[in-house]
Amino acid sequence: IPVDVFDLVIFGGTGDLARRKILPGLYRRFRAGQMPRDARIIGAARSELDDAGYRALVAEAVREHLEPEKRDEESLAAFLETVHYVTVDARGDAGWKELCALIREGTVHAFYFSVAPSLFGDLAERLRAHRLADGKARIVVEKPFGHDLESARELNRTLARHFDESQIYRIDHYLGKETVQNLMAVRFSNILFEPLWNAQYVDHIQITVAETVGVAGRGEYYDKAGALRDMVQNHMMQLLCLIAMEPPYRFDPDAVRDEKLKVIRALKPLTARDIVRGQYDAGPGIPSYREDVGNPDSFTETFVAMKVEVSNWRWEGTPFYIRTGKRLKARASEIAVVFREPPHAIFGQPRDGQGNVLVIRLQPNEGINLWVRIKEPGPGGMRLVEVPLDMSFAEALGPAAAEVPEAYERLIMDVIRGNQTLFMRGDEVEAAWAWIDPLIADCESCGEPPILYEPGSWGPEESAMLMHREGRRWREIR
Ligand code: NAD
């Protein structure tokens, strides 16, 4: 379904994020017929370019970041006609008049802040001063949203001076993933799961976000952030919320976000001693983290594993184990809801506690699996075996699955439609920082270095021990 005609300004339109995600994503929506031909995409950045120069940059970005089957020259040429450019200084007056002239009255206008967060305030202020911050305007802001509670509050206050909360779209691209939304569909549109979705039937939940890459190119930022700020405070917290939240009364932005907020507020505080912090070491031909960031004394964690508890009626007694890291064995993100064993084993076979698992896989091969025990075929008697009921989209939906929009595409279309459900509200972001700040402060003050781990492993041994101590284990991920 096509969205309304819009003018989208991408501040930072020449930057890495714009080239890798935003522009190719917009092109895909254009090619799919969702983006109207009279929409305008206006790149706005510091580089001195004209429309032709910027169109060349956009074409190159699309060719570089989309596989040949996802693009064609004819639609690309048509797409480029919607593209414009203005040289703008977020901190000065240059370019603002020209920008105003390109934005049409009566259209939806959205401003994507794909620039360093230190420029958010300047941009918001200038949008207001040039009367672009009217009721039709929407702004999109990228992570990191602050580096602690105080800076997040300050950022929220700055934006609130110029925009209403209903105009602010804080992106967490994990929420734009097809499977993440499917998680809500599976939970709330089937009778099968919700009755079991509580501490009585769920033994524990595992959330893994594993990367194989190091911090290449992002060292300067990462060394000040670490995995707790870079992954846990935002992406992992969001996933945990969607699993743990109560059913919202309606699928409505504030109804959903109210329920997520309650989960964050119910998280038990953690201290440095409760969690495993790791840092990747050097391996054959692979530099260590400290070499990557050029800081031989860095205590920054590139891996964390922890047990998180949600202290409420539904979840008391069901831990959420989360782990994330760089230079791990596989690039994979998944959520596993591990159900309890039946109360009595009539077949007498030893059970390892992972008979029924609902696996929500975010990457690679997005999809959902439900593992069940069945009888192993053949004459061997009642031997049980675990098999997955596969809800992988690629197989079930055929070619339609190939057209599934990627996270950024979907989220930008939601901005145009004015749907905030998959964006973080200011109070959610602050609550997540309020929970994680004391933990980070404790880690920083305890003086303990992170545990070194081998690149290509699953992190420090202590991560496995965190589970073993409680008679559990991480699911094997390939
Ligand atoms: P980048 O350094 O590649 O690009 C920065 C852009 O900002 C450039 O287009 C530059 O011209 C513009 N710019 C800088 N100063 C300006 C000024 N005074 N006035 C106008 N424009 C100015 O950065 P990036 O990697 O594209 O990241 C942009 C934002 O997105 C950052 O907040 C970053 O944290 C966030 N982010 C990036 C990624 C990513 O994969 N690159 C992922 C998540 C979040």
Image (tube, rainbow, N blue to C red):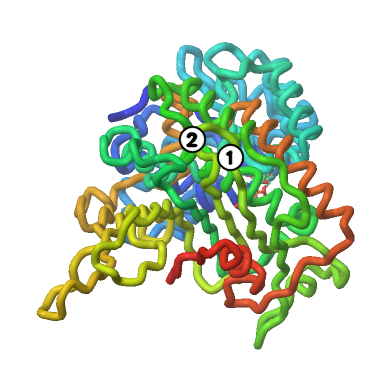
Q: Is residue 79 above or below residue 376?
A: above
Name the amino acid, label 2. Arg
Q: Is residue 57 above or below residue 262?
A: below
- Secondary structure under tag 1 reads loop
Q: Residue at x 64, y 56 (%)?
A: 306
- Please identify the quadrant where the C terminus is shown: bottom left
Left or right? Give the position of 52 relative to 297. left
Task: Specify whether tag 2 is near ligand 1 (CB below 8 Å).
Answer: no
Left or right? Give the position of 332 relative to 395. right
Q: Residue at x 78, y 49 (%)?
A: 440
**Which quarter holds ligand 1?**
top right
- Secondary structure under tag 2 reads loop
Q: Residues within 10 Å of mark 1 (few under 14, many from 20)?
A: many
- Please identify the quadrant where the N terminus is shown: top left
Q: Position of residue 312 (x, y in %)?
A: 56, 33
Q: Quadrant of residue 194?
A: top left
Left or right? Give the position of 428 relative to 8. right
Q: Position of residue 93 (x, y in %)?
A: 77, 26
Alpha carbons under labels 2 and 1: distance apart: 9 Å
Q: Position of residue 301 (x, y in %)?
A: 74, 62
Q: Residue at x 75, y 22 (%)?
A: 157
**Total number of numbered discs in the rendering:** 2
Instruction: Say which of 353 and 18 sits in front.
Output: 353
Instruction: Say which of 130 and 152 sits in front.
Output: 152
Q: Which mark is residue 314?
A: 2
Q: Which mark is residue 179?
A: none
Q: Which mark is residue 310?
A: 1
